[in-house]
Amino acid sequence: MQITTIKYQAVLFGSFNFPPVTDTTIKLLQAFASLGFMPQVHNLVDTVTGLSMPRISLTQGVGTTILFADDRIDIISAMPVDLSIKGFIDTVVDYVSRLDGGNLQFHRIALILDSVLDDLTPEEFERIRTKLLPSVKGAPFEWTARWVLPQTVGDESYNVCFEAVTATGLMLALQNRLQPLSGLKIMHDVSTAPQNLAIRFSGKNLGVSLSAIADIIAVEDQAFNQDDSSFRGVAAGGYNTAHTFYPPFDRNITLSLSALDRGGFGRAVASDSGSSSSIASAGGLFSLETARRRELCSVAQREFVEIARLENFEYGYTPPSERYVQEFSRKYPGLLGDFLQGVALDEAGDSQIMIAVLNALGSFPYDAVRPFGQILAVAAVTNPALEVKEAAIRVYETWEHPDGARVLATVECPWGWLDLYRKQVIADLSV
């Protein structure tokens, strides 16, 4: 049996103001660009109202994401090969210190540890299932066990959630790529109790508070890994979906489009709507339609990059890469943002690809690519490469929107001729 940590996640609850607009992007880049983060817009679907809500996020490499909403900030590290949970907490504290001058406050916090038990022998797999679901007879192919136990440590009350789900068919979402999993996925999700709405967490005590949760997770994880035949959640009667296995395509399956976008996992598995787990996506739910959309974007990204690398780009004519993006937009208008943002995240260090992205972006009207287009353009003007910075300035010149003057006024240009061009565009847009 091999145990692999596949995700750390911290969730900080409060009242925040990070709308997916240009000003937010500029502030976040000023705080995080030196760490290699790139901005992105996610369209998350509210599982209650069904409405799509654009949210801004920051992504570093393949596995690190900071996702901003009005009521929560999610910090996710996927496939943290060389990162301990203590190191992750230190990273969270550092990131929070960069937001609003480190003055953010929270009324609830949560810490999630996801891991996979792989290379299980049939005997090991059945022993774990029997330990978690002792009253289920037979050997179901797919099953889920989950419960939430209240726990008090000192003056703080917690909800301690445990979930085990067969990982066959599960996929880990890393950017627009889906990585299949196997074995058994284990989740420890511990949060402060939602009933206490007092604002009592800040950058000053966040590290200590998250470490206290990590201690609870360590105890729970040790209890789960013991070879005895029972697990404390079952013995304490604290389960709310234990003693139940969920067959595929059950009528009570809950689908959520937000799970994949929050660094979650995907498969149609049953969700306990009454769970007091800290995050709705903790169970890792997403629809097959979401997977299809991801695959479409992934294929388009590869094809676009191949085209852009072969073309000899010159301003003044329509290159093949631009025609490809226009055709993609006609076929899949709702996926244009995911497609172009995916390319920009993967190829941020390749000037030729970034120029092709920006040229294609500028071929659309300003409002047609709101808000992802503006966020991509803001990120590009901070790119250290001269050619990329020039291409970004040209995008604002092409859009002819007065907001461009305000953005370009914040740009530093160490090249004299490019700075003159920047100032001329500012003047033109200010008329």
Image: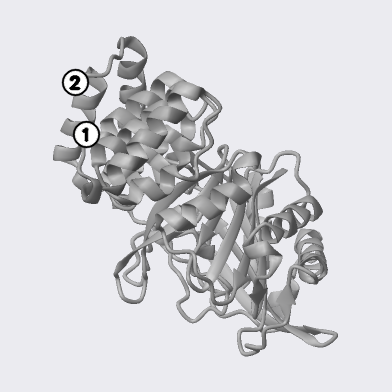
The front one of 422 and 260 is 422
Vertical position of residue 295 compared to residue 184: above or below: above
* Residue 120 as seen in the image, left or right of residue 66: right
Q: Which is nearer the eye, 321 or 214?
A: 321
The image quadrant of residue 352 is: top left
**What label sits on residue 363 in the rendered view?**
1
The amino acid type found where label 2 is placed reads: Thr
Answer with the quarter of the image where residue 221 lies.
bottom right
Disc 1, SS: loop
Q: Is residue 346 above or below residue 14?
A: above
Q: Residue at x 40, y 23 (%)?
A: 353
Instruction: State the CA–CA distance, disc 2 to disc 1.
Output: 9 Å
Residue in the image at 65% along x and 41% along y: 35
User: Hey, which quadrant is residue 236 in on the image?
Assistant: bottom right
Q: Earlier in the sequence, mark 2 or mark 1?
A: 2
Q: Amino acid at mark 1?
A: Ser
